[in-house]
Image (cartoon, rainbow, N blue to C red):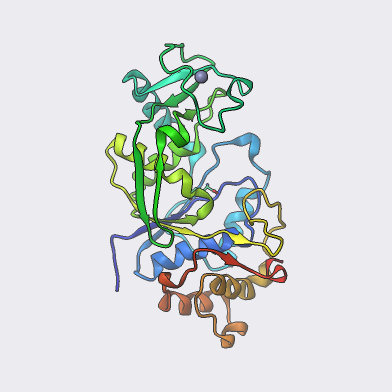
Amino acid sequence: MTDPRYIGRFAPTPSGFLHFGSLVAALASWLDARAVDGRWLLRMEDTDPPREMPGARDAILQTLERYGLEWDGEVVFQSQRHHAYAEVVERLFNMGLAYACTCSRKQLEGYDGVYPGLCRNAGHAREGAAIRLRVPELLYRFDDRVQGRFEQHLGREIGDFVIQRRDGLYAYQLAVVLDDAWQGVTDIVRGADLLDNTPRQLYLQELLGFAQPRYLHIPLIVQPDGHKLGKSYRSPPLEVDQATPLLLRALRALGQEAPLELQGASPAEVLAVARQQWRPERIARQMSVPEVELR
Ligand code: GLU
Ligand code: ZN
């Protein structure tokens, strides 16, 4: 079945190279789009220069290319989108939906990561302060295509959250919602490490009048020692000459068929077969991969 309206995206943060876990997420997102002849966009989430690793942007693009994960159109860089973020922060602040917070990290200790609203009604000036979005005392829920129903009470579990940091940098939550809407993204396929960020994003979408995309959160890969393979896992770049075997492993991790005949095929050939056979309902809620496969 084709769906010409489908727009998917991959949105890596250039704080490190792509590792096997990010390859699995990129592949799932690409397949989900290409299986219906949809578009697949690439967005570099470079909103945090201090956390950026030199050379990572180029390395990520090069790896995707070599692995045959071609994207449509120009790469969007969030570092070029500050004007759009600034305008929305300004608007939310002026409407009283967001406010300035001067709390230090120390002051927020002991609240289990839930912002206790200390600056809610303080009326601080914006200069040198972080900007927080007021959250409603409501449950936000959505139906994930793999994880099923997910819900979170924003007031009790998160509290008012930062949309612009004290150092002026824009928060991921804000940038991701604005850009997904601006790029017309209909389907978000990404790692389950972002599952509990989604309700904040649903609230922002609602507040700004954006349509809600569909979500598919890929389970995190659990290593044999129980550790999750996430962003903090510093790994070497995925090797170019390993593209075919690693794509086949990634397919297996996603519960898809990865016929042995494809071992000698090019990455493009593997992807051409995989997009015909994509069955997202075969993705398990949790996956583990033997250690050897992570290399
Ligand atoms: N930039 C985020 C990351 O690398 C992904 C954002 C998203 O897919 O929503 O974890
Ligand atoms: Zn505060």
The residue that appears at 49% across and 38% down in the rendered structure is 172
Which quadrant of the rendered structure holds the N terminus? bottom left
Which quadrant of the rendered structure holds the C terminus? bottom right
Of residues 156 and 6, the one nearer the viewer is 156
Q: Is residue 82 left or right of residue 238?
A: left
Of residues 197 and 115, the one nearer the viewer is 115
Of residues 195 and 70, the one nearer the viewer is 195
Residue 212 at x, y = what percent?
31, 48
Q: Is residue 14 left or right of residue 73?
A: right
The residue that appears at 63% across and 61% down in the rendered structure is 222
As displayed, is residue 57 above or below residue 23? Answer: above
Q: Is residue 223 left or right of residue 143?
A: right
Q: How many marks?
A: 0
The residue that appears at 35% across and 31% down in the rendered structure is 136
Residue 219 at x, y = what percent?
52, 60
Q: Would you say residue 76 is visible in this rendering?
A: no
Q: Is residue 230 left or right of residue 214?
A: right
* Residue that sits furthest to the bottom in the current view: 261
Image quarter for residue 96? top left
Residue 234 at x, y = what percent?
71, 51
The residue that appears at 71% across and 56% down in the rendered structure is 235
Residue 166 at x, y = what percent?
55, 22
As displayed, is residue 55 above or below residue 109? Answer: below
Image quarter for residue 214? bottom left
As displayed, is residue 120 above or below residue 249? Answer: above
Q: Would you say residue 238 is visible in this rendering?
A: yes
